[in-house]
Amino acid sequence: MTDQSTPVDGFPQRVLRRSRAHRRADAIACGLLAGLDVLLVAVILLLGSEGVFTADWMGYAGMMDSTAASYQYHCVVFLCRAEAVTVALAIACRLWTTAATQLVVLTSAAAFVASLSTYWNP
C-alpha cells in the first residue's frame, strides 16, 4: 500500500493513461489516417464516375461499363477491411482517438459508397 498522495495504478489506469508524447502521436496518426481516408474515398468516387455511379450530383456518369458491375461491392468490402485493420492496429498501439476516428470515417464512407446508385443497383 502507498501513502494517500500516490494512488496505486491498476490495470485500467495504466492502459488508459498516456504520456504527452503518446497523445501527440495519437493526434498525428489520427490526422494522417483521416486525410488518407478522405483521399481513398475520393479515388473510389473518381474511378467510379467513369460509368459506374449514376448519382445526380456527380454529373454525367458516362457510358455503362458492364465490366464494373461489382465495383461498388468491392469498394465497400475494401473500406470495411481497411477499417478493421486500422482500428485493430490503433487499439493495439493504444491510439484511442485514431481508432474512434477510423470507425466513424470509414464506416460512414462505406455506407455512403454503398448508398450510391449504379447502373446495376438503381
Image (tube, rainbow, N blue to C red):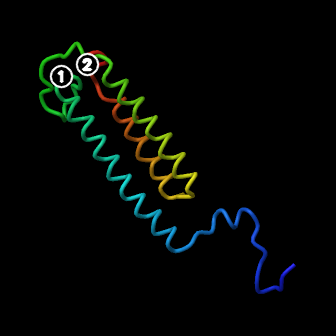
Write the residue at 37% across / 59% down: 31
In contact (CB < 8 Å): disc 2 and disc 1: yes
Which mark lies nearer to you, 2 or 1? 2
Which secondary structure lies at badge 2? helix
| Label drawn at residue 85 | none
Q: Which residue is mark 1?
A: 51
Q: Which residue is mark 2?
A: 68
Question: On the rendered structure, is 94 left or right of 6?
Answer: left
The image shows residue 65 at horizontal and vertical percentages of 19, 16
Residue 72's place in the image compared with 110, above or below, is above
Write the residue at 81% across / 85% down: 4
Instruction: State how many labels appear.
Output: 2
Quarter of the rendering occupied by the C terminus: top left
The image shows residue 94 at horizontal and vertical percentages of 57, 58
Residue 83's place in the image compared with 55, above or below, is below
* Amino acid identity at mark 1: Gly
Residue 61's place in the image compared with 41, above or below, is above
Lower position in the chain sequence, tag 2 or tag 1: 1
